[in-house]
Image: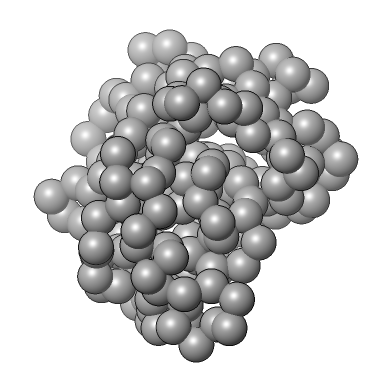
């Protein structure tokens, strides 16, 4: 799949990702917030990465994520946007979603972003629940559609309150190639959205690419 020449406005809409309950299988209440990050403007002023290079790289979408230390071995689906502008996620917490307008594992720069529900009413706790306990130095492997394995080492694990996450940092198209894993966690508010419920925080794991 080739990269699409998307507008910056389209890309930054993913700053709203996972701002809802992060529990699959129920109607989802959405939040809105301001996002003022323009990755394409940043890329044009970065001397190491050109916009042309970012837009012309033929992406190999991720198809599988393995984090052996957490017993994570799950398929990855290509995802875009919901009609309301939020990132789409697989309904099952046993599958991760990759945002197709972000970097891919073979991209020359930027973050490959994978997100998944932490649980669901139908299936219970999903694999990404383990992200809350992952340690820096843990290895993660992403296999792409070409069959190539890309290895990453976890460098940070953050728990951030919803509404305070600097999404532009995590969905950046510039900087060293890296992996970002996102799910929900923290305290659960069953009354949010008129009874829809949601977790109060996001867990965000960042890993640097080593091979």
Q: Please determine whether, in this image, residue 112 is positioned above or below residue 172.
A: above
The reply, left or right, for residue 129 in relation to residue 113 is: right
- Name which residue lies at 51% across and 21% down: 147
Looking at this view, name the residue that lies furthest to the bottom.
Answer: 45
Image quarter in which the C terminus is found: top right
Query: How far from the left and from the top, in percent, is residue 151?
Result: 71, 35
Q: Please determine whether, in this image, residue 49 is positioned above or below residue 97.
A: below
Query: How far from the left and from the top, in percent, is residue 115?
Result: 47, 39
- Name which residue lies at 30% across and 73% down: 8
Q: How many marks?
A: 0
Query: How far from the left and from the top, in percent, is residue 204?
Result: 62, 49
Query: How far from the left and from the top, in percent, is residue 165?
Result: 53, 65
Using the image as rendered, state which of residue 204 and residue 32 is in the foreground: 204
Using the image as rendered, state which of residue 79 and residue 34 is in the foreground: 79
The reply, left or right, for residue 140 in relation to residue 30 is: right
Using the image as rendered, state which of residue 138 and residue 25 is in the foreground: 138
- Name which residue lies at 42% across and 63% down: 54
Q: Is residue 205 visible?
A: yes
Q: Please determine whether, in this image, residue 60 is positioned above or below residue 11.
A: above
Q: Please determine whether, in this image, residue 139 is positioned above or below residue 189.
A: above
- Name which residue lies at 37% across and 12% down: 122
Q: Is residue 191 visible?
A: no
């Amino acid at each position: 799949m080739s990269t699409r020449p998307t507008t910056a406005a389209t890309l930054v809409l993913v700053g709203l990702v996972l701002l809802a309950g992060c529990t699959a299988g129920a109607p989802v209440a959405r939040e809105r917030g301001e996002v003022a990050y323009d990755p394409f403007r940043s890329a044009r002023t970065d001397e190491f990465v050109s916009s042309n290079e970012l837009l012309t790289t033929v992406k190999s979408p991720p198809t599988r994520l393995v984090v052996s230390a957490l017993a994570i071995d799950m398929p990855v689906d290509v995802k875009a946007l919901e009609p309301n502008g939020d990132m789409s996620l697989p309904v099952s917490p046993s599958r991760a979603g990759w945002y197709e307008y972000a970097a891919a594992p073979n991209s020359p720069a930027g973050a490959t972003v994978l997100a998944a529900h932490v649980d669901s009413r139908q299936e219970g706790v999903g694999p990404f629940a383990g992200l809350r306990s992952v340690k820096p130095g843990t290895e993660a492997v992403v296999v792409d559609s070409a069959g190539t394995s890309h290895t990453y080492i976890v460098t940070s694990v953050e728990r951030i309150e919803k509404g305070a996450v600097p999404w532009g940092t995590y969905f950046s198209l510039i900087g060293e190639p890296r992996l970002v894993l996102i799910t929900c966690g923290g305290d659960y508010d069953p009354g949010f959205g008129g009874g829809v419920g949601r977790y109060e925080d996001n867990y965000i794991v960042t890993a640097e690419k080593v091979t």
